[in-house]
Amino acid sequence: MQNWIFRILAVLSFSGSLISMGQSTARNNNNLEPVAFADGISDWTLERCIQQALSQNIDIQLSMLSEEQAALAFEQATRNFGPELGGSVGQFYQSGRSIDRFSNQFVQSTIGSNNFQLQGSLLLFNGLQNQNARKQAKQNWMASGADLESIRLSVTLQVASAFVLWLQSNELEIAAASVLNGSKLQLERGQKIYDVGGSNQGALLSLKAQYASDLANMTNAQNNKISASQNLKQLIRLPATQTFEPAMENFAWSSTEFPLNAQELIDTILERRPDYHAAQYRCFAAKYACRSAKGALFPILSLGGSLGSVYSSNAKFIDGYSISGFTPIGRVQGSNEIVEIPEYTYSMQTKAFRNQLGDNFGQSLGLNMTIPIYSGLQRNTQLKNANLAWNRAELNLERTKQAIENEVLSAYNNYLNADKRYLANKENVDLQQQNEQSVLQRLNAGAASYFEYQVANTNYVNAYQNFISAKYERSFRRLVLDFYLMPPIADYNSIKTHK
């Protein structure tokens, strides 16, 4: 963006529309002549005003946030290609009658247990939805970047326009001050002539009326300059209490004509406009969204697996036994002796936590396929909506193209008209100045009345003011055309390829 600021300065210099901005004008002998102008002490140059506006403009800051959100969406779409992995840990207590999961018997006790599980899945195929979603997110990200660049360029042009308007109002104020000074000198001269009886009261009143008119014009010029300064100050978002005085810029005049005709300008401009790039990117994004919606009609194949183990306080093992007695089970045939078996008493102990985790460890691995059969034709409706969005994006692209062509053609015609107006006013001001000089010489020789000179002087002043207006209008119109011809913005495809 810094390079663009310097190019704006170069555009102002190349356009040749700001004539001798390092000079002001003063009136000597009632003629507007250039005099040396002291450089202002203010450092609010055009470059600094543009930098201030770019750093403080709210629309730019909002656009930066939108671009950051689009970048995050693209990064997330890229991460969606990776596997999903999750784990779970549980602590449970169960009391009352229940089935022991280890002995499959009813027990009446409080059992504490833990569950540990790690599971994951990897998407193998889903109709290329993830691939198209990633491409869509990338195009949206590039569109957001182009939007940001478009707003930056628009703000830059607005600041340059307001700065040129301030230069115009400043020069008009200087011209009005010069005219007022000349009127004051003529009034003082006329008063002296009237005092010695050399003129009548009507001539003196005419001088006073002219002075009052020039004083009113001076006040209007001052107000216009204050308004232009406030507009520029608000545009670059300076605090109301901060002192602000734009610096005078020195730009050279160049008579170089615009290098392209209207059609050549239109043919060149499209690939240089970020708003057209943004419309293109959104059209591509809509196309990939349509493909993603179509992919939802295909089956989904995924690979899944899990690892798990459990622990229970009711998991026991025998760590010893003893004979507590004997139980008869029958008699021996013939001798009639009693047959007995021993009764054992077992001592139980809960299995260790680590041993249970190892003994109960389980794992699984498998493929899963989900086939969409019928869901109220929701996927078909989504596909149709995606197609409509794609058609809408293409129409928006065409509308943006037409708007740019109309804008460029209008700007080109405005420049041609402004150039003709400038040349006509330049010739007019030269002739009016010559006429004023001629009438002044006749007035000094007594061959013309003051009324004749007053008419000639008024015509010259009006012609000079029109010339200033035409000069700065031509400045801005040429600035706009050179603004269109600046090098295109960086290719977002190349900038973001690494993503």
Image (tube, rainbow, N blue to C red):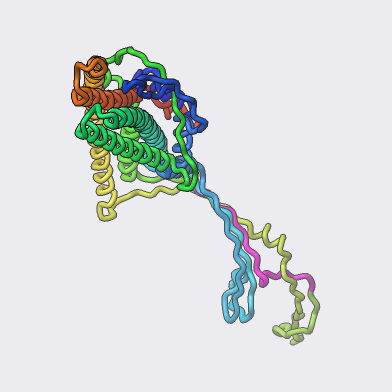
Figure check: 55 above or below 192: below
- Residue 181 in view: yes
Q: Give the range drawn in magenta.
A: 303-320
Q: Where is residue 128 in the image (x, y as percent from the top left)?
A: 38, 39
Q: Confirm whether the magenta stretch covers residue 308.
A: yes
In front of the other: 189 or 12: 189
The residue located at (71%, 64%) in the rendering is 353
Q: Position of residue 314 (x, y in %)?
A: 66, 72
Residue 169: name its quadrant: top left
Q: Confirm whether the magenta stretch covers residue 7.
A: no
Figure check: 124 above or below 30: below
The residue located at (59%, 69%) in the rendering is 101
Residue 190 vs residue 78: left or right?
left
Residue 90 vs residue 451: left or right?
right
In front of the other: 148 or 229: 229
Outermost residue, front side: 196
- Residue 142 in view: no
Q: Position of residue 317 (x, y in %)?
A: 72, 69
In front of the other: 378 or 272: 272
In front of the other: 491 or 65: 65
Residue 415: name its quadrant: top left
**Main SS type for the magenta part?**
strand
Number of marks in picture: 0
